[in-house]
Amino acid sequence: GSTRLLSKNPPADRGVDKIFRAEPDIDFDISNAGLRKTIFGMGDQDDVTRSQVPVVVTISNGDLRYSSHPVIAGHFLNDGVLYAEKSIDNYLQNTLTHKHNLGLYPGEIGSNAIFSKMEGSDFKGAVIVGLGEPDQLTSLLLSKTIEQGVLNYLLSLIGKEIPIGGVGITSLIMASGYGGLTVESSMKAVITGVNNANLKMKMLGNHTYNTIQNLEFIERYANRSLNCMYILNEIATK
């Protein structure tokens, strides 16, 4: 048979490789739990990764200057050194601003920078982790960037004197406002990131490497600290 419906001209790009991008998976779980996971970027795993390394989690009310451990804080891509970071910068003699001005400051997910304690200061230092773009941040990405920052911090402690109470980190409630996460999802992401970092350090099988034993969340305002205590209790009892 014959037909006039088919073109007699060969395709212009025959033999040329083309890249086809798969469509993203569509989640049809419309239950409360399913919607919650979709909105906050959670997978099918438990809300908080269970750790083989015990971690004591506490809530403190007060200024960052009096944190028990180095403070881990987040920085959105292309932002300036603002808010809590600005306070940290003041306690560390503007080293954050200098690093930012030199183009060496973290911004992408997984990027981080460690700022050591200054001589003569009672502020313990800081770990700044990249949060990426504000409208793209999820709790899963937050836990990933926390994990990377904690791993680098733990590696930086090799050969240094460890406090009697063990290694600790103090965290802000990150991305709970501008970043769009709830306080609960932010806290869960931080706890999961710390647990994942501890697990990876233990998997190295090197006894000279430390793990995080104390995780402190710090809030300046009393009502927010109290709210964090309620949320932490709910996380612990789930």
Image: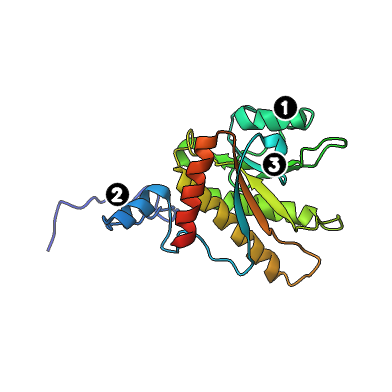
What x and y, as percent, mark residue 15? 43, 56
Residue 9's disc is 2
Sequence-first tag of 3 and 1: 3
Q: Quadrant of the image for the C terminus? A: bottom left
Kindly state the secondary structure of the residue where label 1 is placed. helix
Dot 2 crowding, Cα within 10 Å, few <14, some 14–19, many 20+: few
Q: Quadrant of the image for the N terminus? A: bottom left
What x and y, as percent, mark residue 119? 87, 37
Q: Is residue 168 visible?
A: yes
Q: Are marks 2 and 1 in contact (CB under 8 Å)?
A: no
Sequence-first tag of 2 and 1: 2
In the depicted view, which residue is nearer to us: 223 or 173?
Answer: 223
> Which residue corresponds to the image point at 64% horizontal and 53% vertical from the top-left?
215
- Residue matched to label 1: 101
Kindly state the secondary structure of the residue where label 2 is placed. loop
Q: Quadrant of residue 75?
A: top right
